[in-house]
Image (cartoon, rainbow, N blue to C red):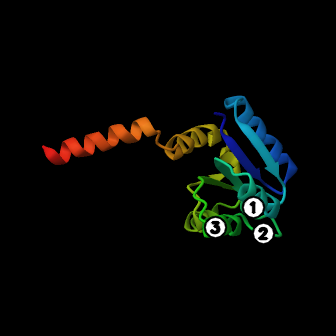
Amino acid sequence: MSPRITIVDDDAHTLFFVRRIINEAMPEAEMVCFNSPRQAFEYICKIGSDLLITDHGMGEMSGTELIAQLRAKGMSLPVIMISSDTSTQAEALAAGACEFLSKGELNKLPGLISSRLAQSQPVSQADSRNITQLFKAASAG
């Protein structure tokens, strides 16, 4: 199944470059872009997303506010915060971002996305049974 990635930035150029970088590295990914964090929030709540990439400063709502609202709704999707202001890194991580990237490091996005998506994949029923059997065997022995 193709990963669904939501991208939010109020700067059209950044949206274009982020989408292009991801499309080149992960052509199978389904990407939805927003210039409004409120619209992105509504979309994620209604449709869902496997990963969110958000800017920090966006006027009507910051990226950290977006993350906080998603976490308050119980949504645990991985979030990568991007910003040209690296002083916002601690705030982003405290709000629930998994990763923080300076906009000058966007070339690192594909690796971070792949890593985060791999970590957040649900365990299949077959894997779950195998894990259960391993635990039973370990505690019996």
Residue 131: horizontal and vertical position, in percent?
Answer: 33, 41
User: Quick one: SS at disc 1?
Assistant: helix
Q: Which residue is mark 3?
A: 73
Q: Earlier in the sequence, mark 1 or mark 3?
A: 1
Q: Which residue is mark 1?
A: 41
User: Quick one: SS at disc 3?
Assistant: loop
Contact flag, marks 2 and 1 (Cβ < 8 Å): yes
Q: Residue at x 80, y 48 (%)?
A: 33
State the residue in front, 26 or 93. Answer: 26
What amino acid type should be assigned to the residue bearing mark 3? Lys
Q: Is residue 91 left or right of residue 137?
A: right
Residue 49: horizontal and vertical position, in percent?
Answer: 68, 49
Q: Which residue is mark 2?
A: 61
State the residue in front, 135 or 6. Answer: 135
Residue 106 numbered tag: none
Q: Residue at x 64, y 48 (%)?
A: 51
**Most distant residue in the right direction:** 12
State the residue in front, 3 or 138. Answer: 138
Q: Can residue 14 be seen here?
A: no
Distance, label 1 to label 3, CA atoms, is 10 Å
What amino acid type should be assigned to the residue bearing mark 2? Met
User: Quick one: SS at disc 2?
Assistant: loop
Contact flag, marks 1 and 3 (Cβ < 8 Å): no
Q: Crowding at label 3, few (<14), some or many (≥20) Cα neighbours within 10 Å?
A: few
Q: Residue at x 80, y 64 (%)?
A: 38
Residue 69, by quadrant, is bottom right
- Asked if residue 129 is positioned above or below residue 71 in the image, the reply reads above
